[in-house]
Image (spheres, helix red, strand yellow):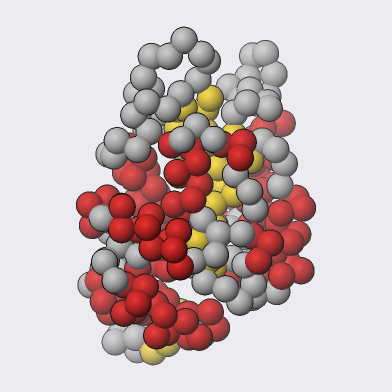
Amino acid sequence: MTPLLIENDLIRPQPRKDALRTIFLLYEGLNTEVSLINPLIANTTLFKNVPVRFRPLRKTGNDIGRTSPLAMIDIALKFIRDNCGPKGCFKCERDKVLIVFDLDVAKNDQTEIDKIKQRKTSDMILCFTNPAIELFLLLARKGSYRDLIAPHEKEIIENDYFPSENGKKERFVLHLFKENFGIDPKDKEADFRFVLENIDTVFQQENMYLNHRLSEAANKLTSNIAYVLKKIKNDKIDEIQY
């Protein structure tokens, strides 16, 4: 198995007397999460005075194709095991691997979702959406939960395929986002600046309308991305609940 590549810090940590915690970022996909969350961390003032550094991890070799939540946890476990110790880059019981993934693979089976929580260790932070990250992206427009998400809650949760303009089929939440925002989030060059510009709206709508508990995620519109980022911002990483 090829080792994960550790990339440079996304932001320059502010000088602090206490030791910095490192949060290593591990993403399910190669495009959407990278193009969205890396700039979100690097280009906002959310983490300006937080004693944390963020370092993206890049999957290599066979790990690139391993995208299920349990597979992602296994990848994180190996990284922690290989890099924990006096000479390693990972400080156990202090640093974290933040894993970002969709829950669509669980098909709203809470028993399968619970397996994810059971496999997690204290060295990890889980960041997830149900069914997919496009639900989080939809929150970047004021009133979008009321106007776009709530009227289509059933279709989004069912996560069935929807015919697209090019004759191919795509998941309904992806279709809904592309139709209303004119952006293909699967495109490597997708520009998510609109999320950065409307991050307060995203955070507010996620907090008000979406479930953020993994233990209650089946058949519920779910995202804990804003919830997790706010906990990190407030230096309350160890208070994150699932």
The percent position of residue 181, horizontal first and vertical second, equals 25, 71
Between 184 and 54, the residue placed more toward the observer is 54
How far across and down, in percent of the image, does residue 109 sit?
70, 74
Q: How many marks can you see?
A: 0
Q: Is residue 167 visible?
A: yes
Q: Residue at x 50, y 86 (%)?
A: 154
Q: Quadrant of the N terminus?
A: top right
Q: Residue at x 31, y 52 (%)?
A: 200
The picture quadrant where one finds residue 187 is bottom left
Is residue 5 toward the left or the right of residue 8 in the image?
Answer: right
Q: Quadrant of residue 176?
A: bottom left
Give the x, y percent position of residue 62: 60, 50
Taking the image as drawn, is residue 169 in sight?
no
| Residue at (71% x, 70% y) in the render | 110
**Vertical position of residue 152 compared to residue 199: above or below:** below
Q: Is the residue 57 above or below the residue 15 in the image?
A: below
> Is residue 77 shown left or right of residue 148?
right
Residue 210 placement, left or right of 85: left
Name above or below for residue 121 compared with residue 62.
above
Query: Image point 44% across, 52% down: which residue?
Result: 226
Residue at the front extreme of this rendering: 208
Which of 101 and 2 lies nearest the eye of the viewer?
101
On screen, residue 24 above or below 179: above
Residue 172 in percent (x, y) is at 43, 81
